[in-house]
Amino acid sequence: MAAKQRATARGAVLFVVLASAAFAVSGPLARYARPVHPLFIAFGRVALAAIALSVLDLRGLARSIARLSLRERAAVLCAGLLLAAHFALFLWGLDRTSVPAALSLISLEPLAVVLCAWGFFGVRPTRSERVGVLLATAGALLVARGAGAGDHRLSGDLMVVGAAVLYGLYVSFARALRDALPTRSYAALVYASAAAFLAAALPVAPGALEGVAPPPPHAAVAIVALALVPTLLGHTAIQAAARRMSPAIVALVSPGETLGGILLGALWLGAVPSATEVAGAAVILAGATIAIFGSRASAAASAG
């Protein structure tokens, strides 16, 4: 039993580290893809990820679709819509604010997971989780105080916060549909659905199709990298983990993404965070840590 627990713990740590590393490149790569419109970047990353997963097992994917009920198909489409909106808001917000601010605010994602579980599944947050929510909210407000300095804009901050909320719903759908589809088929269908929704939005979004025929070489490389690393590896890992791991373990990826993304942004793009943004990031991460580990302690006590 002890050996099994150690193996499970090692697996959880490995998942968090690898998924965090995959997610951490998302912000810097999206910024590097400029001047391509963020909505087109979002479309490109999910469309390429959907194609890559689909070609691996077309027959298996077709069989999985055939077995789905009408309600399950609608749920998969909703998951795709949530992912499309999440990517659109995050990448658009990133384009309108600083990299450190965006990556700090996106670490509200684990708290969104907690609140969605409470609101939709009746899982009441523990005292530690409530304290964590308050701390992280205070950190988000602290980050937003720097709006107007350099690339930092309040409108971008609000978009990123919206993306964090949608992430909580998106993870909930992955858990709810775990018995309906294998992970790979589920991921392929969610990415394809997200790509379809984003493709429908591109013609009506101002400037979204400008300069994309073809995109600049550096932007094309960045979009391919976004599809392969944070989408194909990172988000597919999240979807798989959401089926069998504690939501608190899955949520640990977001603080890791924040730390790694801010470090990469500083080293690669020269996006050095301001003192206010660093302080806000620290408070958000402290709140997220309290909420996450409080949730884990509660789960352990219940199991005992």
Image (tube, grey):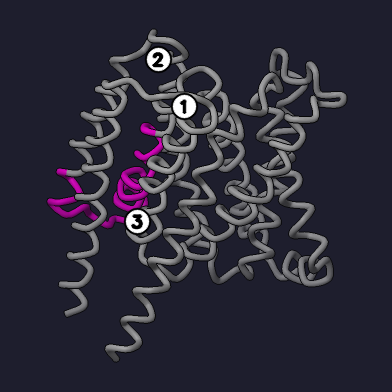
Q: Where does the magenta region start and end? A: 104-131
Front of the two marks 2 and 1: 1
Front of the two marks 3 and 2: 2
Give the residue at x 82% y 61%.
55
Task: Give the CA separation, mark 3 to mark 2.
Answer: 32 Å
Task: For the C terminus, give its image quadrant.
Answer: bottom left
Question: Which residue is labeled 3 in the image?
Answer: 121
Residue 190: where, in percent of width, then height?
A: 65, 52
Numbered tag placed on residue 99 in the rendering: 1
For the residue pair 24 and 159, the one nearer the viewer reads as: 24
Q: Secondary structure at mark 3?
A: helix
- Kindly give the residue lying farthest to the left in the view shown: 127
Give the mark nearest the N terminus, 1 or 3. 1
Numbered tag placed on residue 154 in the rendering: 2
- Judge left or right: residue 181 versus residue 150: right
Numbered tag placed on residue 135 in the rendering: none
